[in-house]
Amino acid sequence: MSSSSGQSSGYDLSFKILLIGDSGVGKSSLLVTFISNSVEDLAPTIGVDFKIKVLTVAGKRLKLTIWDTAGQERFRTLTSSYYRGAQGIILVYDVTRRETFTNLSEVWSKELELYSTNQDCVKILVGNKVDRESERAVSREEGLALAKELGCLLLESSAKTRENVEQCFEELALKIMEAPSLLEEGSTSVKRNVLKQKQEPQASQNGGCCS
Amino acid sequence: MLKGKLKLPRPLPIPDQLGSLIAGGSESEEFEFGEELEPIHPAALRLHRESDDAEEAIDNDDEGGGGGNGMDHKTRQRLSKDTINRVSVLKSTSEEEKRSDLEHELSQREINLEKLQRIASTGIPDGGGLRATAWKLLLGYLPSSQDLWEKELKENIQKYSNLKEELLLNPSEHIWREGKELSSTNQHKEGDSDGLLRRHEISQEDHPLSLGKASLWSRYFKEAMKNILLLFAKLNPVICYVQGMNEVLAPIYYVFTIDTHKQNAVSAEADCFFCFVRVLGDSVDHFCQQLDNSSSGILSTLSRLSDLLKVNDEQLWHHLEFTTKVKPQFYAFRWITLLLTQEFKFESILRIWDTLLSNPFGVQDMLLRVCCAMLLCVKSKLLGGDFVANLKLLQHYPEDINLEYLLQVAQDISPDTSSYCLSL
């Protein structure tokens, strides 16, 4: 099944991923590094930005629709609508700014509980900017402790050096695929698309017959 | 769901942002902010809509090469309305005419604002400081009587420096400044830096929204920009600074700073500040989280955009809202709060702002129409797209769009639901 749908749509499974965390922690940078292999100066995200990445994980072609949200508090009332239907959520903090870490446990994780519609939604904790080791304000141990509390994995990354960037998306995808309910969601959204694509040419053929 | 939310008026913790700005100033009576939106008179608007074929044509323009003719034709058509009975003039000629029309208008002792709005709405020619003067007039920052300009500008510089003194410099800085001024007066004269950015130092590609660290703007910009935004934040503590405000300030700052008049360049920072406040005047609530659900908040404006689209093209509206579920908050939030500054190339932004600022019914009214026109102009692509394709298209609006046509569509759009119903 997966191979046939894969051939017609270019991927086997489709997942929605959300990036959250304080302003300036590097959410957009992680995403841009992941998508385009380049490190750029980026303007702050206003509202939401989103990107698509097709990649192979565990032999499956995955299409990830990644929603990159604005971190500044002003934009938070709008964030609620972005959580809907997400199978994976990446919580990002900046290892050199302690408040971005405490805000994850005090603000963002609560927001997530409130708005996430998926019971089994997979989370991953990412401590970004480890290239600035000398400025580090959050230790790896503290990161691990929070990850344990949230029941998720921790990765320390650098969008600048690309360290662990791909891994954080791949690990998340793997975990999502391990959850049967999410796997089901990911494949039904593909099937629905394939069905649509199949229906359209048929409809036009019928039209041709009638006329 | 959006509408449901909007019906719940929350107690507003903020008295009035503009009021608070006034309260913060020392000479409060002299702050006069953006006028309230006047009711729209449908009869005053040209309602001849381009046919759907024309929309198709623009979609085709995106894909194929043969879009040039259509554009020239349209542009000429429109320009010929404004210049007197001149048929088939070359674009450059009409640009020249527009320039002299505008120069003539701006040289009058008493400026006719309606006339200025009419000329400016078709685009202000670059150079000669025309745009800077026109924008100041359109925003109501300069009075229509030319005799008052000098006095007005002087007072504003003074007012601004008082505000800065009062709010941006802390006591220790005062002392430090005094010491520094004494010791550095000579140095100051030696270098050519009188604190101004010179026109020849700026390349065409470099502008206030350039992100590279090498950008002259990003270096120079920072100080003046910071001052303006910081002052705004101090005077509006509830709104404070919201990311993206810098982008709204950028076109104003650019236009005022490259103004060729020496005196205007000196007062650029002060002018920018007051004009920035005026530009935000009728949309400042969009930046305020506490007002998101109020009638002046961003959610309400987004739903007005949705209504506007529904009235003008129900098929497209239905396809976006229901078939592909591409909600306005996913793409138009940024369009509206940042007045389109992130969606187009810099020179296009200036052109769009000419139209926004010269709308007699206010910036927001035209902004919504331009947003709606942006949707109408890529209609066929949107109708063929799914959620992902459509969101991608709208978050990265095609650069090769025919801007003059887009703005014409915007001008011709039925302004709002009630007047549309009347016109039926």
Image (spheres, coloured by chain):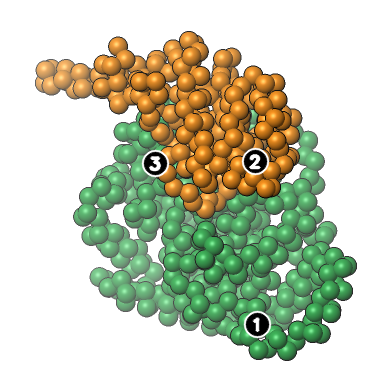
Chain colours: A orange, B green
Image x and y of residue B210, in percent? 51, 61
Query: Dot 3, how many residues are within 10 Å of its Cα: few (below 14), some (14-19), or many (20+)?
Result: some
Image x and y of residue B170, in percent? 85, 65
The amino acid sitting under disc 1 is Asp
Task: Answer above or below: position of B296 versus B258.
Answer: above
Q: Is residue B127 left or right of residue A43?
A: left
Image x and y of residue B48, in percent? 37, 51
Q: Is residue B379 left or right of residue B284?
A: left
| Figure quadrant of residue A125 | top right
Please name the residue shown 47% across and 27% down the image.
Answer: A170
Please name the residue shown 66% across and 40% down the image.
Answer: A95
User: Which one is nearer the viewer's eye here, B332 or A137?
Assistant: A137
The amino acid sitting under disc 3 is Leu
Q: Secondary structure at mark 3?
A: helix
Task: Answer above or below: position of B70 versus B223.
Answer: above
Whole-angstrom CA distance, mark 3 to mark 1, is 45 Å
| Figure quadrant of residue B250 | bottom right
Circles 2 and 1 on the same subunit: no
Q: Is residue B377 left or right of residue A128?
A: left
Mark 3, residue position: B393
Q: Secondary structure at mark 2?
A: strand
Please name the residue shown 70% across and 30% down the image.
Answer: A141
Task: Report whether residue B91 is seen.
Answer: yes
Mark 2, residue position: A94
Whole-angstrom CA distance, mark 2 to mark 1, is 39 Å
The amino acid sitting under disc 2 is Asp
Task: Report whether residue B391 is seen.
Answer: no
Q: Secondary structure at mark 1?
A: loop
Chain identity of mark 1: B
Q: Are marks 2 and 1 in contact (CB under 8 Å)?
A: no
Mark 1, residue position: B194
